[in-house]
Image: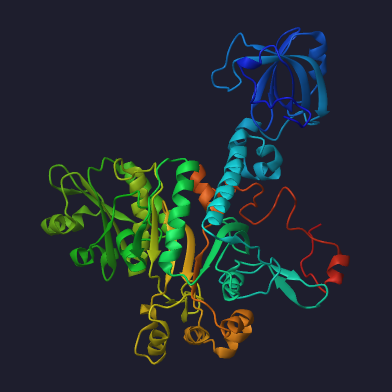
Amino acid sequence: MVQSRTHTCSDLRMEHVGQQVKLVGWMENVREVGQNLAFVVLRDFYGATQIVLETEDMMAAVKGLNKESTISVEGVVRERGSKNPKLPTGDIEVAPSKIEVLGRCRHNELPFQINRSREADETQRLKYRYLDLRNPEVKNNIILRCSVVAALRAAMTGEGFLEITTPILTASSPEGARDYLVPSRKHPGKFYALPQAPQQFKQLLMASGFDRYFQIAPCFRDEDARGDRSPGEFYQLDMEMAFASQEDVFSVLERVLPPIFARYGKYNTASEAPFQRIPYLEAMEKYGTDKPDLRIDLTLTDATELLAGCGFPPFEGSTVKAIVVSSFEGARKQIDKLCADVEVQSGEKAYWFRYDEKGEIVGGIAKFVQPIKDQAVEALGLTPGCFVGLTAGKLLTAQKTAGVLRNKLGAFCPGHMDAERYEFCWIVDFPMYEIGEESGELEFCHNPFSMPNGGLDILKQAAAGEVDPLTITAFQYDLVCNGVELSSGAVRNHDPEIMIEAFQLVRLGEEDVKAKFPAMYNAFTYGAPPHAGIAPGVDRMVMLLAGEDSIREIIPFPMNKNAQDVMMGAPGFVEQKQLDELNIMCTAKEEE
């Protein structure tokens, strides 16, 4: 080992006893037990080693040093009298003959204890992220990320894909989220945009004659944070294949991902190929979500007809979904909390009753179900000891609320969730179009560049009023793992005529398409191959592998929930001179 040391702080073992060594690192702790006896824990990137100070000179060398100062230690390795089996170097210690201060910590008090930084306030952790990253638990997540990215690169290269980088400064385009805009100094009044995804560029590569492309692509979207989404910047394993079908894309990822999840994941078991394929409408009806956690064995049952006339007001004129849990042992207080959690997450109420061991309907809305007990037992397949969770509303509302309830019940009820595994599935046959919540008009449901099932013919039939556009599905798919959407992908629309017809249904004509997507439209007029692709999120993938609930735990320097870098002070105001160079007038002023 070079770098001014003979070994790292994780290297030394009994076979090194008697050797002269040099270690460097951070002084994690000093414990004085006598006038000339103290124990120092020295930590570097690799591990920790105990240093024993037994002379006045060595005690003086660290006297007055604050924790987290960096030091160099030269001395002899010897066997420890009191060994520490929890430490890889716990059988030995180093008796120093020389200690040199390399970088003095000038703060008597740290913002938090390094090894307990995860217990600190998140704002403090992000402000002092360089200290937070010294915590081995936090550091190991970043190491895991590096290992996973390297494994993904190796696997994709082994599949014959070329890693090609695409531009960061590009044109703004309507891709669903807000762009981050970059003003142009040389072209006053004009702006670049940071790419929300390399979508158009990778399709242009296919039109350029490249057969298999991938990159660990940075993507930029001005959107709010969530537990599984970082605001501002994120990374994805972006890939595209020419002359490819949906099954070709599935085949590649089903070979690439399971070995990586099995090797690096918190759990040792991952789905083997082929992953289960679930149509979107079936997923919503059966699981109440288009990202089902298949580790949970509970499913939804339609109880609309059964409970339509039971007299419970929320069920009148509504779709009703039921989830039956056998051998349920939760107490009333636990059920109330579970229902409250569902309402917080979904914004809708959940209802319930039990079919007890005596064969009686009890609890919750029991008085409305009791008169139709026999029908309920038969329709829902109830056995003594069952719990029935219920949701109601318009179809999609009832489904989504039931999906949240299903996840809560799965996590709460023993025996209904095989938690320690990675369960993948493909969600397929997504709707091509939907009615926009804000516009109330027909909009693309997901990716506007997807190929519709039925091609040009089905679009023409929709334009003629012969087919409801909302019934058109697309060759579009999501990859889901343990209830987390890892990726969306699609077979692309590579035919200009189909592209124009698809956009006309959302009130965009041929000139609009040419204006918004000039490069892609023109490239496709020169003969483009059928192509398909996908882009699994690297951040979400590593979050699952690490067993973390927040994506910020696996990003080296994450922003907070308000898209602020509190460590660097970004975003921040700039000097007027810079604004003048860019021909920008800023209306917001820094608060004095």
Above or below residue 6? Residue 266 is below
Residue at horizontal 21 percent and vertical 63 percent from the top: 307
x and y percentages locating residue 10 in the rendered image: 64, 26
Residue shown at 44% from the left, 54% from the top = 255
In the image, farthest residue toward the left: 374
Rendered image quadrant of residue 421: top left
Nearest the camera: 89 or 289? 89
> Residue 161 or 277: which is nearer the viewer?
161
Measured along the vertical axis of the image, is residue 246 above or below residue 19?
A: below
Q: Where is residue 218 in the image (x, y as percent from the top left)?
A: 63, 59
- In the image, 364: left or right of 90? left
Q: Nearer the viewer, residue 124 or 311?
A: 124
In the picture, measured across the screen, residue 412 lies left or right of residue 245, that is left
- Locate residue 111 relative to residue 360 in the image: left or right: right
Front residue (pair 522, 107): 522
- The image quadrant where one finds the N terminus is top right
Q: Which residue is drawn at 67% across and 42% down?
A: 124
Residue under the image location 81 percent in, 57 percent down: 592
